[in-house]
Image (spheres, rainbow, N blue to C red):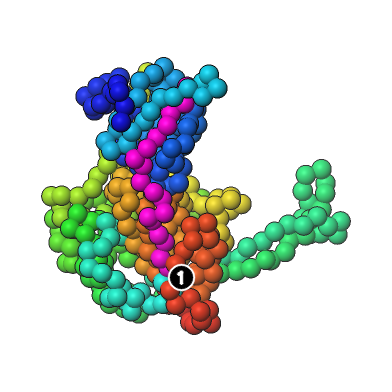
Amino acid sequence: MFASVDVVSARDTRYKRLVNEQILMHAALAGRLQNERAYSAVELVEALAVFMPSALECKRLKSELQSHRNPFTCGDIDIDVVRLDGRRRFLLSGLPSASALEVAVHYGDNLTVLPTLRTGSYELIYIDPPFNTGYDQQRTRLRTVEDSSGDRVGFAGKRYRTEEIGSSSFADSFDNFMGFLEPRLREAHRLLTDEGALFFHIDYREAHYCKVLLDQIFGRDSFMNEIVWAYDYGARSKKRWSAKHDVIFWYAKNPKQYTFNHQAMDRIPYMAPGLVGAEKAAKGKTPTDVWWHTIVPTAGKERTGYPTQKPLGILRRIIAVHTNPGDRVLDFFAGSGTTAVAAREMGRSATLVDANPEALAVIEQRLEPYGPIMHGWDSPSQPSQQGG
């Protein structure tokens, strides 16, 4: 394509950050980059930033781009360097199209829907089933409105009243929880590709029983990690140590061959940055199997009001490391649809299943920008049995 082309190699340290084909494909499939569009160095870094491991890497990439003058190739992607209005721009071609991705949403009992899906068609399955807490899970959405006779006092002495604008709920109690899970987990094993992975999200009440069941279905050798998601929110017990974590089990269908993109990990701050030096502190460190991450903020833009909604940050980390651009992700306890949002942001296709009409209403609205294909969503009065 070019008269003079730098064929970039991973061994060429000058382009160590510039030449990550995965990152370019991530951005293209997420709709953040387009073919035959000219980008400045700043615009290109902004498009790639969400897929870069740290702010320091973004800064270095920007510096490299601003000093780079020759066209180069990155796998199947060509990047030309042109001048427009006297300024250097980067023109990309060979990027995959985001239109190849889809989000499919199935309304119904997952035990009925899963057998209709093709064997070996998903590289990643994440599920956050009901935790069998024995209670109805419910979230009420509120808003405050300025009112001189209201029941709350805010800034500068102004008074407000509280209004309820909606609520969501589902039953979270099973007499035979393992009997409920087993056929669904066997379907999960069938649906995974040979190099696929299951991430099973549960809390302390049932985690140990679920681990034994998963070992029976996947094999003990397929157990790769117990990830602890730790958070610091909510009331404290005065009778025992307060439970402030969930457990996520990672099983690889083939423990000798699976996807683990170490370079795609986000980085986290050092707890004692003064002990590692300025450059290392700025770069951050890779996470361990204990993930400190806040719950979805009560008043944050991310919050949908659906019970048990999980943070996008948790799903982004799993999807970035354990799948590749264009892969397919399945969540058959879909809840508020967080898995699909993270998957599409990262340039993956997603399939969701849930039998809760309240969940489907949230999913349909939340995924509207991605044009979800809705299956069976025409009877919102059907009863619910799914959670998450």
Specify whether 309 is left or right of 142.
left
Circle 1: is it few (<14), some (14-19), or many (20+) Cα within 10 Å?
some
**Whole-percent x and y of residue 6?**
28, 23
Residue drawn at the location 50% of the way across and 69% of the way down: 359
Residue drawn at the location 23% of the way across and 48% of the way down: 259
SS under mark 1: strand
Specify whether 377 is left or right of 350.
right
**Whole-percent x and y of residue 366?**
53, 60
Of 301 and 236, nearer the camera is 301
- Residue 18 visible? The answer is yes
- Which residue lies under the disc numbered 1? 374
Is 154 in the magenta?
A: no
The residue positioned farthest toward the right in the image shown: 148
Residue drawn at the location 39% of the way across and 69% of the way down: 353
**Whole-percent x and y of residue 142?**
66, 61
**Whole-percent x and y of residue 45?**
45, 31
Is 91 in the magenta?
A: yes
Q: Which residues are magenta?
A: 88-105
Q: Quadrant of the C terminus?
A: bottom left
Q: Quadrant of the N terminus?
A: top left
Which image quadrant is residue 125 in?
bottom left
Q: Amino acid at mark 1?
A: Met
